[in-house]
Image (cartoon, rainbow, N blue to C red):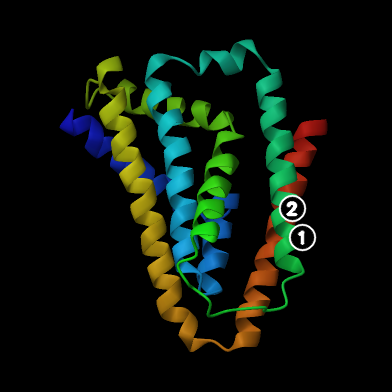
Amino acid sequence: MLVAALIGFLFGFVGSMPIAGPVSALIFTRALQGRGREGLHIALGAGVAETAYAALSFWGFAALLERYLWLETLSNAAAAIILLALAVLFIRYRGASLTDDSPSSSSSIKGFIAGFTIIALNPTLLATWTAASATLLSSGLVSLGPSDAIPFGVGAFVGIVLWFATLVRLVLHFRERFSHEVLCRVIRGTGWFLLLVAGWFAWRLFA
């Protein structure tokens, strides 16, 4: 069980590092705005949803994606819509507040729901976790079974949240070195990048 939790932690921590995903970009932007608490709550919501996918990967639920191809289509459509909405939000950002990090219960709840929803609407993550698990098991280095699903998922949750907490801390620390205008440009630039990613998902949907 301990080995499964440790492997889940490493997968969750390292797998969350790329900032190309909508959750990473959203947390990164919230930290740039000085809204670190909201960013952490987004991470918690995303971690809960992805933990479920990580655990389910051990029970063979990825076969659903092969049987019901419409799930992948739905996932691409949801990803494109979410990324497009975030892209427009970031591109239109004009720097309303870069220092407000008050512990608002409303923003915390909204952040958690946003993180959870973005991940929950992407069932192809189940295939991603299954592929990672299959690669590990085929290496012969460890032997894990269905009973290790829960500790693996818990480890993944800790790894995911810890990475995003580290990201928030780093961004909050270094953002003070940049001017307000530079921070706004970075946020808008992130929006244009997300727009390109949204276009890629849309292309996959119609291709």
**Quarter residue 124 falls in:** top right
CB contact under 8 Å: marks 1 and 2:
yes
Image point 65% across, 13% down: which residue?
A: 68
Task: From the image, tell me which residue sits under label 2.
Answer: 85
Tell me the crowding category of disc 1: few under 14, some 14 to 19, or many 20 or more residues within 10 angstroms, Cα based: some
- Residue 165: where, in percent of width, then height? 38, 60
- Residue at image point 56% right, 53% down: 110
Q: Residue 21: tell me if it is visible.
A: no
Label 2 crowd bin: few (<14), some (14–19), many (20+), radius 10 Å: some
- The answer to which quarter of the image holds residue 146 is top left
Residue behind mark 1: 88
What residue is at 49 percent from the left and 31 percent from the top? 128
Residue 118 position in % (x across, y down): 59, 43
Compare residues 190 and 109 and report the one nearer the observer.
109
Q: Is residue 158 above or below residue 150?
A: below
Image quarter (top left, top right, bottom left or bottom right) of the C terminus: top right
Q: Amino acid at mark 1?
A: Val
Q: Total marks drawn? A: 2
Circle 1 SS class = helix
In this view, which residue lies farthest toward the front? 105
Residue 40 x/y as whole percent: 43, 58
Q: Is residue 28 visible in the rendered structure shown here? A: yes
Is label 2 in a helix, a strand or a loop? helix
Per the model, the C-alpha gap separating discs 1 and 2 is 5 Å
Q: Say above or below: 54 vs 17.
A: above
Residue type at tag 2: Ala
Q: Is residue 92 above or below residue 136?
A: below
